[in-house]
Image (cartoon, coloured by chain):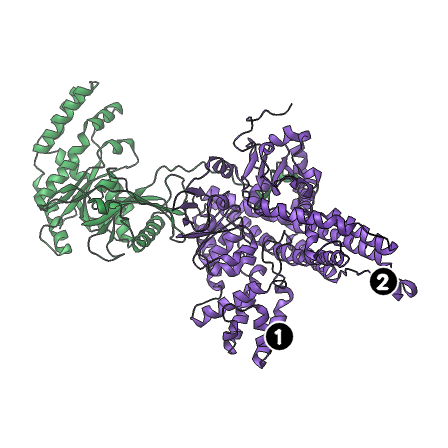
Amino acid sequence: MATSPGAVGSFPSPFEIATPPGCEGWEEMYPHYALFAEERREADEGRLWFWNSMHFPVPMPAFDVTSIDGPYYALGAWQNRTFAVPPAMGIDYRVVNSYIYISVNPVTDPQKIAERAEFFQKRAGHYFQNWDELYGKWRKKMEALLDELMALEVPRLPEYEPDEVVFGDANSSFYRVLEAYSRALRMSELMWQHHFEFLLLGYGAYLTFSDFCKQALPDIPDQHIAQMVAGLDVLLFKPDAELRRLARLALDTGLAPVFADGRTPGEIDAELATTDAGRAWLEELEDVKDPWFNMATGDGLYHYYRSWFDDPSIPYASIAGHISALSEGREIERPTEELARERERLAEGYAELLSEEQLGPFQELLGLSRTVFPYVEEHKFYCDYWFLTRWYNKIREFGGLLAEHGYLHDAEDVFQLSRHEVMQALEELVLHWATGGLPLGPTHWPPIVARRRALLEKLADWSPPPALGTMPEAASDPVTVMLWGITPERLQAWARTDEGATELRGSAAAAGVVEGPARVVRSVDQIGELRDGEVLVCGSTSPAWAPIFSRISATVTDIGGVMSHAAIVCREYGLPAVVGTGRATSQIRTGQRVRVDGTAGTVTVLDGDP
Amino acid sequence: MSEGHTRPLAGLRAADEGRFGGKSTSLGELTAAGIPVPPGFAVSASAFHAFLATGGLEERIAEALEGARGGDVGAVQAAAETIRAAVGAQPVPDVLREEIAARYGALARESGDEPEPPVAVRSSAVGEDSGEATFAGQQESYLWVRGADAVCDAVRDCWASTFGAPAIAYRARMAADRPPEMGVTVQLMVDAAVSGVLFTCNPVSGDPSIVAINAGWGLGLAVVGGEVTPDEYLLSKVTGEVVRERVNAKHVEYRPAAGGRGTERVAVPEDRQGVACLDEARLDALVDVARRVQRHFGSHQDVEWAIARGGGTPESLFVLQSRPVTATGAKEPAPAPASALSMVMGTFGAQVRDAAKEP
């Protein structure tokens, strides 16, 4: 029997969420298994679903579901079927009004947990003990996959097959199109497999160190724990470091005026090409681009997030910003030596205060965390940025092929179809290309694309509740704590926060208190709206946003812990940050004055009537 | 000057605790460690005995106590009043009086400014950890005392405080006949602009990386006596940064009384109540002192401190007393795990049950 309405704990039942007017039919964009369905109502109402705003802050286009399924195949396969994390299987997701809610499948049977613990100890132990060697192999696998992706050719459909089909070994174009698309899908799945290979174990080691510190030193600021572990020579800081170097070069060779405000990258390039110094600078830039322009402009899971290759306005704006800072005599380099000294000073300072029994585990755990952390930071560059931006571009090429034959109006429309629908469209395309018959695709797909675009646009205005369903009674699941910072305390706080409250609580991620006007940014294409001194309020940030951190005064996020990217970058820039507030983007409006207390972990809306 | 019943604080070490009591010897230790402590001298517990031996005081006390033995609250109260009247009426023996006056004179010359500098006179119990010390009026403090005669009177008042009714009842319960071993500390006053207490750990959570500070305006009485809600700070001992702070409305403060003797309790003007009484430089100085005090004693300490009016930081900061922290809210430490890896396993819910079976 289904749970009666109202029996659900502190959060709304997923079955009671209304569809915003005019958005009826949004379900058609998603697979049947991703919806809240009557058949599993009792089970789904009885568990907790939280909005994964960290990875999916805006409505999900049909094609981008590939970037939900892929991660959750891979996370579940590693966590549940490979390492067998004892109390937690994989993560289920559901779509509500185009937003993604997730929930972990717990293991409750003590016997099963014991059985899984045996597996876990053996298998995870192998990884921890051979980390550097395995991670070395991982980089090779990942680099090979990237090479393969960049070499993948999206074939065209010619009037007559080329000679190689007759006189050589080439396959027919219909097969090559379908094979290339299948291959592209398989590559994405392989990337997700690699993506999750080390991730849980890496976060787990860090979380253990963090828990140990909090047990031994109950008042230790989270930031100190993070600072002791965080790497200094991290891959993710390289792209911006290269931009700073290019800024210096431009200044030293008299090119600063070329980067005047308001110029597009195209205009800048054109003017640079007219002088020797300019051409030398452009050559230098070319060297930097591979691989550093594979940096994404967002967290990578949506097709919207392009790389610096695709959208050079972000790196160019950043270079211009660095040039103006330099010409005003401001220091722009990351103070790495100072950061290194601080890291050691903290580690030694805390070590001195611990008892003899505590010292050994402290140092071992710190060492292990430092060993695993490069992966946690670097996988983002390889997987989320480099691979995904290139991969979505390949899909755009398939979109281009469909558009060329009238199946879509524009290559970009391909993202309004599911990956299966794209295959279907391609299958019809090659069929009617081969037969010369009259295709239906050109009249079938464009209205579907138009309808879905309109739906996504309307659904962008809907504010998803932070959680749905029933508050869990059991102890916290290690995986959601590690990856999303969702602790029982956090859930309690979300449940307590009244609509319209003037104070939000989150994790104190970077110290300091700042007041300023809020700028709510719900997707990466809005970051251009940020003005100097504003408080960035967003779902979550990524290091790709680094250039904007020199303009803002503080950061507030809906989701994330003290090791989230927003937190790391804010500490580097000395900006206060409060992360994991649950609902900042739905409670704060652009233009409101807010006080961000990054020491206490609170955000206060100062001018009322929220 | 004879080394009879008194000694300069700077000359005392932990080993003298049995003669001079905890407060005086810890101040001696701090002075020796280079921590800024106002100069002063200590009166030994033997001085108390010498005093009791005069004028048949001991016998009169024994008699009064006999009357209170097994008696009710009223009888104990009556005995306490009888004894304290007797103690108050008995002059301090001349030899002792002269010795205290000489020490006080030397202190006046050392301080330089005035012939009768103000001092604090406080009890310094021997065996501070004993329950007896708790009841023996160890908290007795006489502040802003001026002149040798007044100092002698204050010393005698400290002795008299060991005969309070609760102390008598306690000793009767413990079947202890003799009064406690009680020294006295005489120390130059600091005209405090701000004062308070610090712990070299967080007394609530037990975190050893924290310096916990409570601070209020004026002399320490208001904070120590719980008469104001002080400004509260938790600072990182490692970096010195503020981990948590709360500035409260401090509505009263104690100052030297208008006539220059004793103290008075005055209201703090409203516009100053909510002002933080410690700035970054003062907090830095306090954290530094906390580190040094803890390092010197090798254990967590509860420190009373004062910042003198008109001086710069850190030279205006003085430690007035330090004693070991006896109880904190720290949870019982978990048994030390076998290895970091087994702890990581625990995070994933895969506790290692039998380390021998580990591959």
Q: Are marks 2 and 1 on the same chain?
A: yes
Q: Secondary structure at mark 1?
A: helix
Residue A291 in the image, given as x and y percentages of width and height:
64, 64
The quadrant of the picture occupied by the C terminus of chain A is top left
Query: Which chain is drawn using green?
Result: B
The quadrant of the picture occupied by the N terminus of chain A is top right
Q: Which mark is residue A283?
A: 1
Residue B44 in the image, given as x and y percentages of width and height:
19, 41
Q: Chain letter for mark 1, please.
A: A
Q: Nearer the viewer, residue A430 or B3?
A: A430
Q: Are marks 2 and 1 in contact (CB under 8 Å)?
A: no
Q: Residues within 10 Å of mark 1 (few under 14, many from 20)?
A: few
Tag 1 or tag 2, which sits nearer the N-term? 2
Q: Amino acid at mark 1?
A: Glu
Rendering colour (chain A): purple
- Mark-to-mark CA distance, 2 and 1: 40 Å
Q: Which residue is mark 2?
A: A159
Q: Residue at x 39, y 44 (%)?
A: A608
Residue A571 in the image, given as x and y percentages of width and height:
47, 55
Asked if residue A8 lies left or right of residue B311, the reply is: right
Whether residue B54 is situated above or below residue A83 in the rendered picture: above
